[in-house]
Amino acid sequence: MGMLSEFKDFVNKGNVMDLAVGVIIGGAFGKIVTALTDDLIMPLVGMVFGNLDFSSKYIVLGATEKFEEGMSLAAAKASGANVLAWGDFVSVLINFLILAFVIFQLVKFANRLSPPAAAVAGPSEVDLLTEIRDALKK
């Protein structure tokens, strides 16, 4: 019974519950940002670059007999070709930058809401100069 009670105390601590809520909300927010990037931002970027779909862009590093020019990324991978899928990386990088910027703004906002920490009172300049003078006398 002791272990069960310790586990209950651990789970009921505020930090664990806050972390769980943060992970769940973070996962949901990540899906929102992915949808924003994949469904809104990347199509606009593609339109600017001439209806280019970045998610399917790749460079063939090593072709196989089954590989044919113009294959989709999925077909190229299925053919066994060694491909560098740079378009998907661009989409993921944009997702990361958006998430990082939003988290930065949230932390910045939260820091404005929290009261500033009290400055630690240390010795004054006069006290320090007095200590230096006394040390030099010795």
Image (cartoon, rainbow, N blue to C red):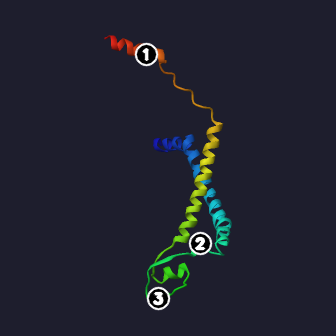
- Residue 1 picture location, percent across and down: 48, 43
Instruction: Indicate the amino acid at tag 2.
Output: Phe
**Above or below: residue 18 compared with residue 65:** above
Which is in the foreground here, disc 3 or disc 1? 1
Q: Is the C terminus in the top left, top right, bottom left or bottom right quadrant?
A: top left
Image point (63%, 57%), residue name: 28
Q: Earlier in the sequence, mark 2 or mark 1?
A: 2
Q: Residues within 10 Å of mark 3 (few under 14, many from 20)?
A: few
Q: SS of the residue at dot 2?
A: helix
Instruction: Indicate the amino acid at tag 1.
Output: Leu
- Residue 84 picture location, percent across and down: 48, 73
Residue designated by label 2: 54
Residue designated by label 1: 129
Image point (55%, 40%), residue name: 13
Q: Which sits in the foreground, 96 or 31? A: 96
Residue designated by label 3: 66
Q: Earlier in the sequence, mark 2 or mark 3?
A: 2
Q: Residues within 10 Å of mark 1 (few under 14, many from 20)?
A: few
- Residue 27 picture location, percent across and down: 59, 57
Answer whether labels 2 and 1 touch (C-beta < 8 Å). no
Instruction: Indicate the amino acid at tag 3.
Output: Lys
Answer whether labels 3 and 1 touch (C-beta < 8 Å). no
Q: Earlier in the sequence, mark 3 or mark 1?
A: 3
Answer whether labels 2 and 3 touch (C-beta < 8 Å). no
Q: Which sits in the foreground, 3 or 54? A: 54
Q: Which sits in the foreground, 132 or 41? A: 132
**Above or below: residue 51 compared with residue 92:** below
Which is in the foreground here, disc 2 or disc 1? 1
Q: Quadrant of residue 18?
A: top right
Q: CA distance from mark 3 to mark 1?
A: 82 Å
